[in-house]
Image: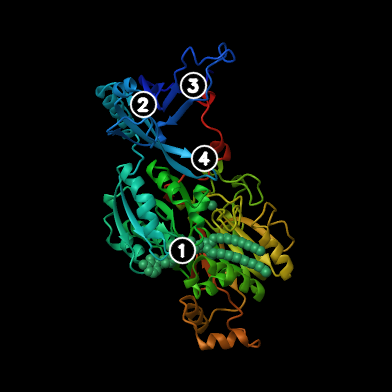
Amino acid sequence: MQEKQPKPPLLLLSSQLSLQNRGYEVTLNSAFLSWKEVETRQKRTAANIYGPLKAAGSHYVPVCEIISVQETEEDCPSTGIGKWQKVPQSLAESNQYAFTVSYVERTQKHRWRCSEVTLHCTDRTLCLQWVQAIREQLSLLTIRPKRLLVYINPYGGKHRGKRIYEQKVAPIFSRASISTDVIVTERANHARDHLKMEADLKKYDGVVCVGGDGMFSEIIHGLISRTQCDSGVDQNRADETLIPCSLRIGIIPAGSTDCICYATVGSNDPVTSALHIVVGDSQPMDVCSIHHNNTFLRYSVSLLGYGFYGDVLTDSERKRWMGPARYDISGVKTFLSHRYYEGTISFLPADENVGTPRDKLQCRSGCNICRLPSADKQVSKDEESISDTEKKGVWQVIRGKFLAINAACMSCACPRSPKGLSPAAHLADGTADLILVRKCSRFDFLRHLLRHTNKDDQFDHPFVEVYRVRQFRFTPRYEDTDSELELREAEGSGRKRFFSQICREHPACTCSLAHSSWNCDGEILPHAAIQVRVHCQLIKLFARGIEEQSVFEEPYTLSAI
Ligand SMILES: CCCCCCCCCCCCC/C=C/[C@@H](O)[C@H](CO)NC(=O)CCCCCCCCCCCCCCC
Ligand SMILES: Nc1ncnc2c1ncn2[C@@H]1O[C@H](COP(=O)(O)OP(=O)(O)OP(=O)(O)O)[C@@H](O)[C@H]1O
Ligand SMILES: [Ca+2]
């Protein structure tokens, strides 16, 4: 049987235009805009006279990466991008009409930039014809957002959210003709409550969050709760099948860790994120729901950490004024305190077809594991109605003393740890990687931590175990009493209490030492006993996953087209 060939792109327009005072063959087809220098006889040297035309000097921009096109108004014709040059009188007069195309250019470390090319035409009709033809192609890209609701946390990270948005992002949105309603938050949970109860979501094609992981967490809580509420789904029921949110979320990084942005885009650069929003990227993402005795507590998309990361966060909340450095100071302090916690972890392992946490293959743009439908992802009503043992996989139980219990729904890559807590975790496979770090010496724990910052395998230690799971439960060895819970709640909200100080410094009292708190995407959960379930692809981001490095390094070549 013959394989079906993809249709060649349809040629739409082709003209000789000028750029930097040189003649170019400019072509627009349904897939690309290209411009190629016209080689004059004089320019063809003996060396290349018989050879093929080189790809160098040819430029290809995929139509889906064009940001905008505008007729360029110039008092005097310019011959380059932003530069005034001496133009021969005859050429200047014959090329006084121009249009500028803005497009995405890839630079190092997964960063995108907005580049421009200005092409000059001999008459205005031709110039307008080009502008119209390119605009028509852009209007066919219906996945692009036209109207966005933007929330800015002015206090995230180094308090630069507002400035980042105004100086770096708003100009890009306006160039792409995206209209925005902007809300600068006035208190914690302002964005969550507005999304949950007030916002007229029908008006928008997406929501943008300017801030860090904590701010993103507010946005997903608002959107997910609103979606469940509108569909009559009860979030308090741990076994409910949740309804996916239809609006995409864009993250403009302006926080302290920015792990969700970094792990879905490959950088924490606001311009890159703005461009991913403009081109209308879409990346589905898993979300964990966390319950305590059939009461809904929170959702998590990145790190859910008990022990080490819970204690780092609890301590760091009291040092918010320090900005991002608070995590390092609290990290060292927590490391030195070397506390361990006893408890029982039960988990439902994932099917093998979604890979394992020790895979060398990482989740990248267009990831096959996240794309292919797998039995694991379809937690259907039928499946919910059958018993645990009949489901694929059997619950496993592990008891012990742990320095850290971490669940990562995705890699959790961030500038502090470029490959992340679990480098092979997937963004949208319906599973989380459960990492158990058993009690070990300070030296061994340091070796494990150090491996988060280099290429070595952080799971290759006898005291570390890692499992790919769909659900898990944790029960601390000593039961939570109401007063302990209250105590941790007070600590979490930064209210230091005299009682808690006594307990920490009094070795005979197990009160504070028996339990840690969960670090849930940078927010403290006071309950130690929790049930967690991964909901496959519950939300969507304006992102595409991390692109393979080669896409950044190699410009489009003729053979690729
Ligand atoms: C020797 C160097 C070891 C460095 C080890 C670095 C491991 C870093 C792993 C980071 C994983 C981040 C996961 C993402 C979590 C976010 O949802 C959350 C909200 O933004 N961020 C944090 O909780 C923020 C968590 C920040 C944790 C910082 C921990 C720093 C530990 C430093 C230990 C130093 C020991 C030195 C001994 C002399
Ligand atoms: N106007 C506001 N005033 C006070 N707190 C706010 C306001 N708006 C949002 N917040 C809260 O600020 C907290 C931290 O915000 P954010 O995540 O943006 O920064 P960060 O904690 O520095 O970064 P990261 O989460 O990446 O470590 C969030 O929990 C959010 O709920
Ligand atoms: Ca996942």
Label 4 to label 3: alpha-carbon separation: 22 Å
Nearer mark to the viewer, of 4 and 2:
2
In the rendered image, which quarter contains the N terminus?
top right
Q: Which residue is mark 2?
A: 87
Question: Would you say 91 lies left or right of 460 here?
Answer: left
Nearer mark to the viewer, of 3 and 1:
1
Label 1 to label 4: alpha-carbon separation: 31 Å
Provide the secondary structure element on which disc 4 rests. loop
Q: Tell me if mark 2 has few (under 14), some (14-19) or many (20+) residues whose alpha carbon lies within 10 angstroms of its own.
A: some
Q: Which residue is mark 3?
A: 4
Name the residue at 54% across, 58% down.
Answer: 387
Label 3 to label 2: alpha-carbon separation: 50 Å
How many dots with numbers?
Answer: 4
Asked if disc 3 and disc 1 are in contact, CB closer than 8 Å, the reply is no
Asked if disc 4 and disc 2 are in contact, CB closer than 8 Å, the reply is no
Nearer mark to the viewer, of 2 and 1:
2
Provide the secondary structure element on which disc 2 rests. loop
Q: Which residue is mark 4?
A: 366
Q: Which residue is mark 1?
A: 157
Residue 178 visible in the snapshot: yes
Identify the amino acid type marked 4.
Gly
Identify the amino acid type marked 2.
Val
Nearer mark to the viewer, of 1 and 4:
1
Name the residue at 27% across, 22% down.
Answer: 123
Question: Relative to residue 426, is residue 488 depicted above or below?
Answer: below
